[in-house]
Image: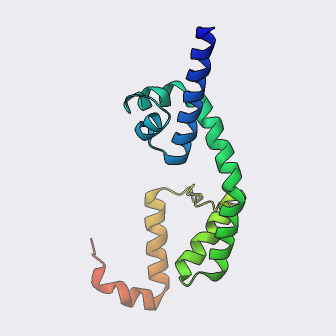
Amino acid sequence: MTKIVAIDVKEKKQAAFIQQYVETGDCMKAALDAGYSHGEYGYQLRDKLAGEIRVAMDKRISAVAPMAMNTLAALSKEADSESVRRQASKDIMSLGGFDIQRTADVTPTDKRTDEELIESIGNLIKSSESIKQALTPYIVNE
């Protein structure tokens, strides 16, 4: 019977540790608050109970998500700072899966060689009197 009580106490202490850790993010304080004799146990408990901590964190995040979304919505409408309103709007869009893609296609479409491009530039310069006048000081005659 003593063994069952010890397991029950251990489970209660671990559950208390998980709750405290999720609330504070401080594993040493969570270990002490849960009844462990040394705060250093918090690091071992954090690693040992990582799966259970993840579940508890997910529940906590789910519980506060509506409030966080309402806060972002209010900031996007009512913040005094333009940059705060813009960032709140970006965060809302990102959370909704509408991230802005900041990539560019830089695949060259012109297949001409360097020599062909230089010749083409030369022909453009020769064909435009205003370009020729503007670039005359920079043109080196070979």
Residue 107 is drawn in which quadrant?
Answer: bottom right
Image point (51%, 24%), residue name: 48
Which image quarter is the N terminus in? top right
Q: Position of residue 139 (x, y in %)?
A: 31, 78
Residue closest to the eye, 128 or 60: 60
Which image quarter is the C terminus in? bottom left
Q: Position of residue 87 (x, y in %)?
A: 57, 70
Q: Is residue 87 above or below residue 10?
A: below
121 sits left or right of 98 in the view: left
Counting labels gives 0
Image point (48%, 61%), residue name: 116
Applied colour scheme: rainbow
Q: Position of residue 17 (x, y in %)?
A: 53, 34
Image point (72%, 60%), residue name: 66
Residue closest to the eye, 65 or 109: 65
Residue closest to the eye, 12 or 79: 12
Q: Is residue 65 above or below residue 72?
A: above
92 sits left or right of 125 in the view: right
Q: Position of residue 106 (x, y in %)?
A: 55, 57
Residue 82 is drawn in which quadrant?
Answer: bottom right
Image point (62%, 67%), residue name: 90
